[in-house]
Image: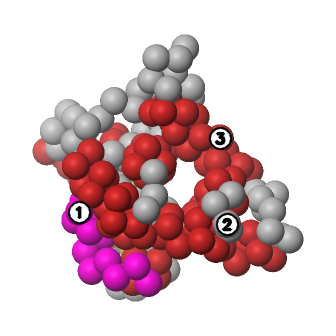
C-alpha cells in the first residue's frame, strides 16, 4: 500500500507531458529507490514509462517526423562527417523520438541512443547534451558507412546490434527481430524525410 502511495505521489508531481521513465529497485539493505536512470546490474521495474519514448517502436507507419528542434545541429555535424542529415534525423526519430533524455533498458543514452562504450569511442563526454550526442551519432554513422562501404542496411544493423554481430553474420543483417524492425523504421522515416510529399 505504501509503495502504491509513493508511486501515485510521484506521478502527481510530474507534468502531464514529456516526462522520462522512472525505475524502482531494492538495494542490498532492502531500501527501495526511485531513479530516472536505468539501474545497471540491478533487478528493477519500470514504475512510470517514458512518455517521450512511447510509440517509437510500434505503429511507426504514418508517424510524423516533423520536429525541427535539432535541425541546425544535425546539419552542422552531418556536413562535418560527410553523412546525409536526413539519415541522422531518421535514426534519431527511430531511436529516441527526439527525446534528449531517453535511456533504453540496455543503457543507450540521448537523442541518438549511444551506448556508453560507443559514446566514449566517439569522444562524447555528455551523452545527454544534444549537440554532443548528435555529433557522436553522426560520427558513428560515418564510421559504420566506411566499415560497411555505404550499405545502408548493414550500417543500420550495426548501429542497432553492433558491428561485430554484422561481421560475424557473414557481413549480413543478423537474424534479430529488434534489429530488422529497427532497419524498417529508420528506412521508413528516412524516406519520409527525403520525399515528404509522398503518401
Is residue 118 depicted above or below 66 in this figure? below
Q: Is residue 199 magenta?
A: no
Task: Please report the bounds of the magenta region as a residue range.
Answer: 121-134
* Among the 4 quarters of the image, the one containing residue 77: bottom left
Residue 66 image offset from top left, x and y in percent: 33, 30
Number of other residues with Cα within 10 Å of mark 1, as a class: few under 14, some 14 to 19, many 20 or more: many
Question: Which residue occupies the extreme top position in the image?
Answer: 199
Q: Residue at x 43, y 39 (%)?
A: 54
Image quarter where the C terminus lies is top right
Q: Which residue is mark 1?
A: 131
Q: Secondary structure at mark 2?
A: loop
Question: Where does residue 178 sit, x and y in percent of width and height?
Answer: 67, 52
Q: How many marks?
A: 3
Mark closer to the chain start, 2 or 1: 1
Quarter holding residue 150: bottom right
Residues packed near mark 2 inside 10 Å, few (<14), some (14 to 19) or many (20 plus): few
Q: Position of residue 109 (x, y in %)?
A: 38, 65
Asked whether residue 36 appears in the rendered view, the answer is no
- For the question of whether residue 138 can be seen, the reply is yes
Amino acid at each position: 500500500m505504501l509503495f502504491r502511495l509513493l508511486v501515485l505521489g510521484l506521478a502527481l508531481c510530474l507534468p502531464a507531458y514529456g516526462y522520462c521513465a522512472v525505475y524502482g529497485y531494492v538495494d542490498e539493505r532492502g531500501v527501495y529507490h526511485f531513479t530516472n536512470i536505468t539501474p545497471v546490474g540491478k533487478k528493477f521495474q519500470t514504475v512510470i514509462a517514458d512518455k517521450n519514448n512511447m510509440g517509437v517502436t510500434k505503429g511507426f507507419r504514418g508517424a510524423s517526423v516533423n520536429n525541427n528542434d535539432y535541425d541546425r545541429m544535425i546539419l552542422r555535424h552531418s556536413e562535418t562527417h560527410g553523412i546525409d542529415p536526413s539519415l541522422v534525423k531518421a535514426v534519431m526519430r527511430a531511436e529516441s523520438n527526439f527525446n534528449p533524455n531517453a535511456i533504453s533498458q540496455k543503457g543507450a543514452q540521448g537523442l541518438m541512443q549511444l551506448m556508453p562504450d560507443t559514446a566514449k569511442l566517439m569522444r562524447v563526454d555528455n551523452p545527454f547534451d544534444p549537440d554532443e550526442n548528435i555529433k557522436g551519432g553522426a560520427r558513428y554513422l560515418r564510421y559504420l558507412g566506411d566499415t560497411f562501404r555505404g550499405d545502408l542496411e548493414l550500417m543500420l544493423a550495426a548501429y542497432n546490434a553492433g558491428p561485430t554481430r554484422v561481421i560475424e553474420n557473414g557481413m549480413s543483417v543478423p537474424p534479430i527481430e529488434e534489429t530488422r524492425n529497427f532497419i524498417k523504421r529508420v528506412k521508413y522515416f528516412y524516406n519520409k524525410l527525403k520525399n515528404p510529399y509522398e503518401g
